Image: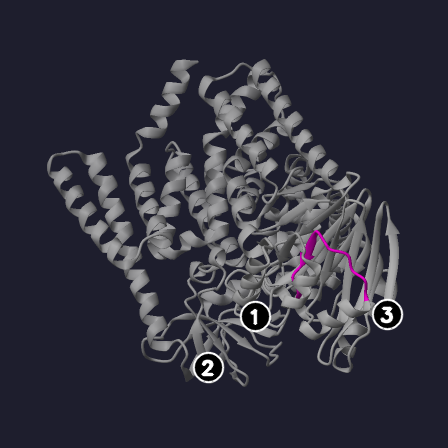
């Protein structure tokens, strides 16, 4: 066994091309995420001279690695310089530009967006750009010409994790325009695949039901804009989102299905070599799909030339070629996940395959299990880092679903051809069955867990340590099985402990980290109450749904809306679409809030929720907790406040009330000293008055606010008042999710 492990390590170590490509890619990674411009130049000079010196001394491998690093640093510096130059010279300006549409217009929450290329002569010529407009152009097609006064801005995002999302797709600038002039033009050859993809999506929409067509369009082409919010969340919850994003899985399925056709393998490989780039263009040519196509092309070329294919070298070379074209592509989350999944399959997969054979468990089922486990080994940390949660049933869901994709994906393409349209009803029925399975899986309690719960991060760390022990010491099947059983036992214990925390005979208060907004979860035994569901910069509904799933709860007993600002209600309608809410308490709307009020009440009635309009006060009991809803009102603001009390302590949650409303609340309602006071108006200077804090003297003030928000919440004056009164302050922008029990 030791010799086998040593040979594997040697196989990984001594691949000159792989080492150089990985060194190049690693230098690009460090440059994009960590280094400033002068640091890149300094390290470039150091690597270049060191590499040349070692080359003269005939240390070829180490020299190649250092020269690869130098190339990565230099290309990253050039790209950084170009982006900085664009931002400094053009961001903030309004210019008359001529543009070429690169794709079809897409709907957004505020209008429409369109990928375009600048045709105007000058420094912007040929630059790709995202154009936002409120002008509908449904008949626009790729290749059409547009002109207008375009206000330019940088495409760099505000949120740190996703700041480079547009840059990673080779988009450096954004533009806004209210009035565009459209001129018809023939579609260039390089944009023709987008026309074919659009036609394929329209054809599926005609042949299949709406839900099936939307799902198969996303599976085939990676276009997810027509998926319902409920299905998106079920896919996230079950760990199946990757099947609706065009990636290496889809390229592999297309290639595998084609290679199963009768005929010479060499001839089929020759035919596949031009077909796969065409599919990549149909699927949008994202960095992850390009990586997969390049890697598959290398594999096919090796087969045609009767050469041995090296997976790790192909993977590193594919990544390096992609980064040579655009170094900032390393920031693309899809590319990172695609590369990590493939690296796991290549590194961990062979060891798992040997384990299956030693257990005498052959068959496609075990192969699918091996691919799923090995792909998740490296992608799981990335998923938790970027998305904050992951599925706990991903192995089960992938085993139940992935086996049918080799049928659905080619079937969705071939049934669009006239002679084969008779297959559409069968395809529709199979897709409906698959979606039913996904929905049922999504309803499983504890189907996902959050990175906010440190106990699960501890469980993951233990699992990785156990896996490393199994890898390093080549444990026998019986020992590995015991480690797997121990891991599952620990996972079950984690879920039971978290569920027991929420189901305990106590009032549990949780302020969710929804950014600039508010969402408070209160549980007492089996009873669930939510106060507000809104945010300006995060998906509040998904965060709340994830928290409820962690608690093993699939419904909400009471939902209290303190007032109608978007940072308190933005997740209201998505929440009703995904979770059953029994009773909803709403304040009397102001005249300017009537439209919002009617929209919310219509959505609630459509879902069968009971609506209660609070005019003065409302009251209900849940377990040992007495809930009282009070009306807050001033000249400018009106809303609701929730007071939850039991023998062990109490909680007071308010909305965006000012100091006058706080004073009137104290005068009208006899409120005992709360253990937890949720800061009104997210810690605004004109709320959380000295009078309120002096009278109530809460044991803790919880502020729900966004990180580095433009409103300055919580205000320093509020923090100073709390300091003077010796009231501890907890903040979601600093501590994240805040939870405690009374």
Residue labelled with disc 3: 616
Query: Which quadrant is the C terminus positioned in?
Result: top right
- Alpha carbon distance from label 3 to label 1: 52 Å
Residue labelled with disc 2: 150
Q: Sequence-wise, which precedes: disc 2 or disc 3?
A: 2
Classify 380 as above or below 131.
above
Look at the numbered discs 1 and 2 and tell me whether their residues touch, using CB distance below 8 Å: no
- Could you tell me which residue is drawn at 53 percent across and 60 percent down? 707
Which mark is on residue 104? 1
Q: Could you tell whether 396 is left or right of 122 in the image? A: right
Determine the residue located farthest toward the left in the rendered image. Answer: 56
- Alpha carbon distance from label 2 to label 3: 51 Å
Number of marks present in the image shown: 3
Which mark is on residue 500? none
Is the residue marked by circle 3 packed among few (<14), some (14-19), or many (20+) residues within 10 Å? few
The magenta segment: 669-680
Q: Sequence-wise, which precedes: disc 3 or disc 1?
A: 1
């Amino acid at each position: 066994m030791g010799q086998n492990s040593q040979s594997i390590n040697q196989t990984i170590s001594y691949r000159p091309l792989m080492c150089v490509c990985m060194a190049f890619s690693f230098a690009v990674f460090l440059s994009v995420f960590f280094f400033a411009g002068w640091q890149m130049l300094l390290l470039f000079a150091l690597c270049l001279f060191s590499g040349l010196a070692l080359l003269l001394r005939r240390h070829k491998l180490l020299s190649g690695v250092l020269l690869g690093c130098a190339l990565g640093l230099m290309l990253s510096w050039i790209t950084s310089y170009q982006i900085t130059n664009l931002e400094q010279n053009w961001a903030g300006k309004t210019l008359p530009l001529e543009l070429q549409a690169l794709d079809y217009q897409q709907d957004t929450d505020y209008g429409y967006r369109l990928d375009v290329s600048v045709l105007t002569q000058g420094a912007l010529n040929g630059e790709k750009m995202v154009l936002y407009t409120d002008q509908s152009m449904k008949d626009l097609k790729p290749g059409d010409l547009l002109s207008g006064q375009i206000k330019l801005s940088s495409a760099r995002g505000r949120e740190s994790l996703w700041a480079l999302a547009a840059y990673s797709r080779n988009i450096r600038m954004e533009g806004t325009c209210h009035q565009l002039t459209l001129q018809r033009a023939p579609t260039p050859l390089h944009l023709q695949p987008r026309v074919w993809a659009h036609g394929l999506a329209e054809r599926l929409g005609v042949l299949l039901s709406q839900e099936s067509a939307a799902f198969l369009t996303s599976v085939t082409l990676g276009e997810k804009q027509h998926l319902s919010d409920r299905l998106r969340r079920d896919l996230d919850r079950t760990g199946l989102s990757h099947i609706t994003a065009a990636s290496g899985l889809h390229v592999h399925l297309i290639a595998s299905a084609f290679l199963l056709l009768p005929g010479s393998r060499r001839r089929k490989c020759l035919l596949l070599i031009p077909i796969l780039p065409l599919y990549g263009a149909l699927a949008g040519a994202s960095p992850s799909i390009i990586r997969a196509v390049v890697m598959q092309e290398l594999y096919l070329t090796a087969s045609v030339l009767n050469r041995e294919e090296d997976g790790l070298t192909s993977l590193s070379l594919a990544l390096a070629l992609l980064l040579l074209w655009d170094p900032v592509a390393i920031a693309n989350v899809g590319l990172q996940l695609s590369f990590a999944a493939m690296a796991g399959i290549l590194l961990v997969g062979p060891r798992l395959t040997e384990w299956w054979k030693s257990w005498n468990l052959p068959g496609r089922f075990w192969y699918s299990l091996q691919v799923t486990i090995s792909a998740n080994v490296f992608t799981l940390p990335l998923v938790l880092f970027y998305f904050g949660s992951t599925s706990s049933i991903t192995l089960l869901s992938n085993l139940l679903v992935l086996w049918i994709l080799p049928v659905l994906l080619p079937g969705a393409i071939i049934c669009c051809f006239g002679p084969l349209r008779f297959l559409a009803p069968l395809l529709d029925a199979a897709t409906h069955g698959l979606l039913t399975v996904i929905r049922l899986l999504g309803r499983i309690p504890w189907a996902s867990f959050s990175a906010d719960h440190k106990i699960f991060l501890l469980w993951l760390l233990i699992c990785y340590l156990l896996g490393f022990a199994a890898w390093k010491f080549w444990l026998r099947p019986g020992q590995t099985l015991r480690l797997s059983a121990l891991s599952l036992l620990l996972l079950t214990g984690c879920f039971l402990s978290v569920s027991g925390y929420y189901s305990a005979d106590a009032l549990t208060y949780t302020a969710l980290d929804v950014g600039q907004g508010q969402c408070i979860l209160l549980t007492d035994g089996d009873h669930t109450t939510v106060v507000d569901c809104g945010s300006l910069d995060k998906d509040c509904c998904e965060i709340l749904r994830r928290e409820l799933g962690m608690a093993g709860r699939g419904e909400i007993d009471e939902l209290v809306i303190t007032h109608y600002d978007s940072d308190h209600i933005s997740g209201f309608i998505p929440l009703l679409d995904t979770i059953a809410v029994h009773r909803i308490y709403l304040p009397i709307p102001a005249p300017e809030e009537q439209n919002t009020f009617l929209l919310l009440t219509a959505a609630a009635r459509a879902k069968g929720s009971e609506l209660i309009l609070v005019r003065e006060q409302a009251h209900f009991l849940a377990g040992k907790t007495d809930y009282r809803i009070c009306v807050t009102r001033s000249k400018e603001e009106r809303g609701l406040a929730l007071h939850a009390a039991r023998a062990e302590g109490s909680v007071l949650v308010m909305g965006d009330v000012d100091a006058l409303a706080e004073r009137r609340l104290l005068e009208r309602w006899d409120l005992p000293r709360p253990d937890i006071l949720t800061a009104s108006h997210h810690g605004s200077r004109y709320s959380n008055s000295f009078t309120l804090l002096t009278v109530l003297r809460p044991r803790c003030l919880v502020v729900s606010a966004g990180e580095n928000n433009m409103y300055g919440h919580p205000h320093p004056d509020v923090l100073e008042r709390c300091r003077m009164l010796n009231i501890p302050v907890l903040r979601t922008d600093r501590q994240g999710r805040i939870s405690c029990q009374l």
